[in-house]
Amino acid sequence: MDAGEPRAAQRVAAAMEQALMAERVMVCMSSNALAPRVLRTGARIAARLGAKWYAVYVETPRERPGRIATDDSAALHQNMTLAERLGAMVVKVHADRPSDGLIAFAQREGVTHVIFGESARSRWELLWRGSTIDRFLGSVRDAAVQVVPLTEG
């Protein structure tokens, strides 16, 4: 018996376990009026994979009830309704930063695919304040990530 055989067998077993793991899709939902495009993309991906999918909204201190802008609140409600209609399990988590809530949820639920909408922040804001997607990628390395443009182009 070759000394490398046990390690090779462990790698094969780990690969088989990964292949048998149920796919879970997380769509990052926001109060952006253009978010339905992201939700529809997530629904299509989940359907192709035969996967359970979540539409996850992170309520930050700026978007708590009483503080969220009326237009944003209305858009969020419409997005949640659409997500449910498309078959998502809608989840609201609370965190100081969207990335913190998304990371915690993805790790807890074993998410395998993540769909983000393109950031509405300017390049300057992304450099100054950081990127939710970059923070997520730095913490959740075993999920496939897709970024959906919010505008046709």
Image (cartoon, rainbow, N blue to C red):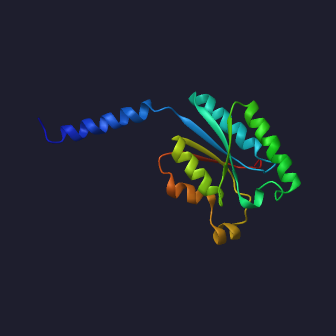
Observer-nearest of 62 and 113: 62
Res 111 visible: no
Q: Position of residue 114 (x, y in %)?
A: 59, 44
Res 102 visible: yes
Q: Position of residue 72 (x, y in %)?
A: 83, 52
Left or right position of 141 against 79: left
Observer-nearest of 121 and 79: 79
Left or right position of 89 against 34: left
Left or right position of 11 against 80: left
Height in image: 128 above or below 60?
below
At horizontal 74% and vertical 33% (from top left) the residue drawn is 84
Q: Position of residue 123 (x, y in %)?
A: 69, 67
Height in image: 101 above or below 39?
below
The extreme front residue here reads: 66
At horizontal 58% and vertical 30% (from top left) the residue drawn is 51
At horizontal 51% and vertical 58% (from top left) the residue drawn is 138
The extreme right residue here reads: 70
The image quadrant where one finds the N terminus is: top left
At horizontal 62% and vertical 58% (from top left) the residue drawn is 132
Q: Position of residue 71 (x, y in %)?
A: 87, 52
